[in-house]
Amino acid sequence: MITAAMNITGTELTSWLASVIWPFMRIGAMFAAVPIFSARSVPVRIRVLLSFFIAWILVPVIPRPPVIDLISAEAVLISVNQVLIGLAMGFILQMVFSAFVIAGQSIAMAMGLGFASMIDPQNGVQVPVVSQAFLIMVTLVFLALNGHILLIEVLAESFQRLPVGPLVISHDGLWQLVSWGSNMFVGGMLVALPAVAALLLVNLAFGVTSRAAPQLNIFAVGFPVMIMVGMAFIILTLPSITDHVSRLMLQAFTLINRMV
């Protein structure tokens, strides 16, 4: 009787650990790659506790994983699959934020502020000041639109579409992920297009002026004018940031649903 009770208790314990550990791996991998949560300013302990808390909440509403030995080759394969799925989901949203970094870099190079860089607190690399301003605005818009709540909802749906198990993302899903990278550059250029086009026209005007009046010091006059025109068009295009963020976020979440 005691042996039978110990066997049942061990099976139940293994089943409970599997139902928490594997969702925790997918959620933790996503938080390690997704914007905002993966920032260096967010401590690793906070990400781990948040991942475990969400996994613990989702356990009753997601399909139960297969009951297998946690110390086995099949368990290692399932763990690797969950990590890859979480990283892929976080990487898609990371590309959305990178689109605005690209837009800021394009505008900064056109207006002559490409040398003015500062440390990006999220990725720990130097980006132009304009890119940093866009990144802060996009982060605030993402939180204002409840993007973090929608992210958790999509994460919960991923367990219904692609339950914990030996299943992996299909080749079509991975190819869609790679192909969607072009949207990052397209979205960045759409954000930067008004300012870059205006600065190009200003450059053409200065080029004509320098040919008509060679004695005019274009470098002394053109540099502050380029900065003022660039700043003016950045301010004028600020209301459209919300539309660009919403469109790219909708495309990203749609891609995540198709991929899983």
Image (cartoon, rainbow, N blue to C red):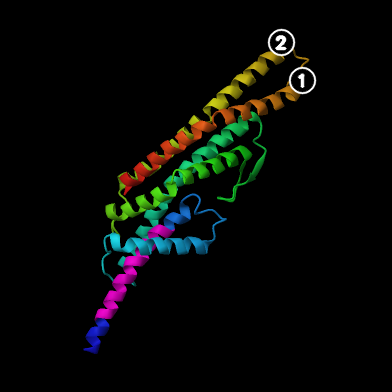
Q: Which residue is mark 2?
A: 212
Q: CA distance from mark 2 to mark 1?
A: 12 Å
Q: Nearer the viewer, residue 189 or 12?
A: 12
Coordinates of residue 152 in the picture (x, y in percent): 39, 53
Residue that appears at 27% across and 76% down: 11
Residue that appears at 57% across and 56% down: 41
Locate the N terminus and report the quarter of the image it occupies: bottom left
Locate residue 224 relative to residue 110 in the image: left or right.
right
Q: Which residue is mark 1?
A: 217
Q: Compared to 112, does 33 lie above or below?
A: below
Examine the image and state in which quarter residue 218 appears: top right
Q: Nearer the viewer, residue 127 or 48?
A: 48
> SS of the residue at dot 2?
helix
Residue that appears at 67% across and 18% down: 206
Amino acid type shown at disc 1: Asn
Examine the image and state in which quarter residue 54 appears: bottom left
